[in-house]
Image (cartoon, rainbow, N blue to C red):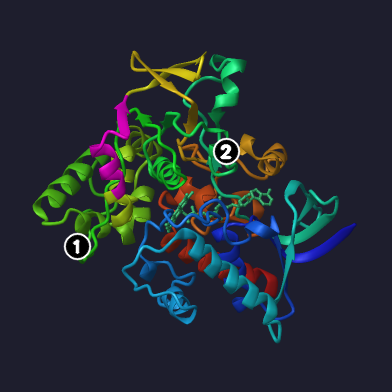
Amino acid sequence: MRKDTDVAIIGSGFSAVALALNLIELAPPTARVSLVGARERQGRGIAYVTTADCHRLNVPAGRMSLFADRPAHFTHWLVENGHAATADDFVPRGLYGDYVGDCLDAALKRTANRAVLTLVDAEALHAQALADGGLLFQLSDGSELAAGISALCTGAGTGRLPLPDEAIAEEVRPFIVQNPWMEPWWDRMPEDGDVLFVGTGLTMVDQCLLLVRNGFRGRFHAVSRNGLLPEAHLGHRADPLPPVLEPGRGEVSDMLATLRAAATATPDWRAAMDGLRPITQQLWKSWTPGQQRRFLRHAAPFWNVHRHRMAPAVAAEIATLRETGRLVVHRGGLQALKSEEKGIAATVQGKVLSAAMVVNCTGFERCTVTASPLLSSLAAQGIVEPDPIGLGIAVDDNSAVPVSEGRLYALGPLTAGRHFEITAVPDIRVQARAVAGRIAAGVAA
Ligand SMILES: Cc1cc2nc3c(=O)[nH]c(=O)nc-3n(C[C@H](O)[C@H](O)[C@H](O)COP(=O)(O)OP(=O)(O)OC[C@H]3O[C@@H](n4cnc5c(N)ncnc54)[C@H](O)[C@@H]3O)c2cc1C
């Protein structure tokens, strides 16, 4: 069966819902908007599907409104729904998923004089170009959807273990968790077994706290090349400094030296870091591809741990786990995985660590076109291509796919090659509003 729509939004995470909600506000009332993605994940995506209370937002509630022009929208929702939280609180991520889901449900009910929003509970498997410039999507429920304008909100992929696939023997595979967000992997864990987390970022932190909550008694090893863990937010946020860098001025290394000096001279270095938020995308865009690559190679791990921080309560718990020796952080590369009696023997920088399971916490891998059948089908027709840096797909400053003449957009981490900092809600909501405005104008034309 084939259906037609004016706009198809592909994805079920924050980006897709933020775009849909902005679009139905801006598009003409006659417009038909279809949101294509798994119903039970709508609005939650990877980040907000968790129901564990220990999985906290890493941004205070006051900065997490769905709408950039209504900053108190989320905090009002919290109060209206009986949650005693303030704008400075780091609330559970599942609660945030409830908020996004509630806003979506309300929008689906409010149909009078509004563009019509329809949920399509399916995955978009492939797409092909139509003669009129639109796209025809083949969906997992066997139907087809033809859209005049489309938006890809399919998120970043999950990282792969930093070992070549052929170096991972068949017998160790059952003890490896490739994507901890997609399965209750601890069901396969002995209660007193040790775990090796590959990656020391926010994903590792989340998985570690979950094991503690679930009563596991083993030790946690975490390994990454630099052994850096995310820094902590403070309970009280210092006012951001005016930006200490200027886009287009100086080499990457000089700029970072300036930032380091400013951070050191400030009572709370976070104020210098936070002051850069409004201009981070401009900074990135002011660099040549060579400079961007140098930044990713040498500075991104340091940037990320200072920029994407742990909620204070989470940081305190992780600190205790480290002090008591429950969590041991190793610096170095993962070199080999072999099977042994109780699970896996992992070689890290020449040292052998035993674990019942190895959990891939390399977190966000930037989306590779080949990881998604949908993106692959679009790439095979020359409609999308990877961005030159390899962080996602190529889009222009308006988040439009260049050859599409305003008929295909992408949002969220998929557009990191162009915008760089486009993974957190405060950045994506701005992008969603801007893209919704362009799509609305395209539908009206
Ligand atoms: C664990 C975690 C915690 C985070 N915490 C915070 C936080 O506290 N604050 C903050 O500001 N940001 C946070 N972020 C970052 C941010 O909110 C996410 O990056 C953001 O949710 C990205 O949303 P997205 O919709 O682009 O991608 P995703 O969340 O990845 O969602 C994409 C969805 O689309 C679906 N999909 C993919 N392909 C198709 C297809 N072909 N057809 C249909 N559906 C498809 C996927 O299954 C997935 O559900 C966090 C991110 C993660 C991973």
Front of the two marks 1 and 2: 2
Q: Which mark is residue 187?
A: 2
Q: Residue 210: where, in percent of width, then height?
A: 45, 46
Q: Earlier in the sequence, mark 1 or mark 2?
A: 2
Residue carrying label 1: 241
Q: Residue 46 carries which label?
A: none
Q: In this view, does 24 lie to the left or right of 332?
A: right
Whether residue 330 appears in magenta in the rendering, the answer is yes
Q: Where is residue 29 in the image (x, y as percent from the top left)?
A: 70, 81
Q: Is 259 colored magenta in this rendering?
A: no
Q: Do the residues under discs 1 and 2 have CB atoms within 8 angstroms? A: no
**Residue 153 at what x, y percent from top left?**
60, 54
149 is higher (above) or lower (below) than 163: below
Looking at the image, can residue 363 be seen? yes
Q: Residue at x 33, y 34 (%)?
A: 294
**Which of the two residues, 416 or 108, is positioned nearer the viewer here?**
108
Hey, what amino acid is under mark 1? Answer: Leu
Residue 423 visible? The answer is no
Look at the image and tell me in which quarter the N terminus lies.
Answer: bottom right
Per the rendered image, the range of residues in magenta is 317-331
> Where is 166 relative to 293, above or below?
above
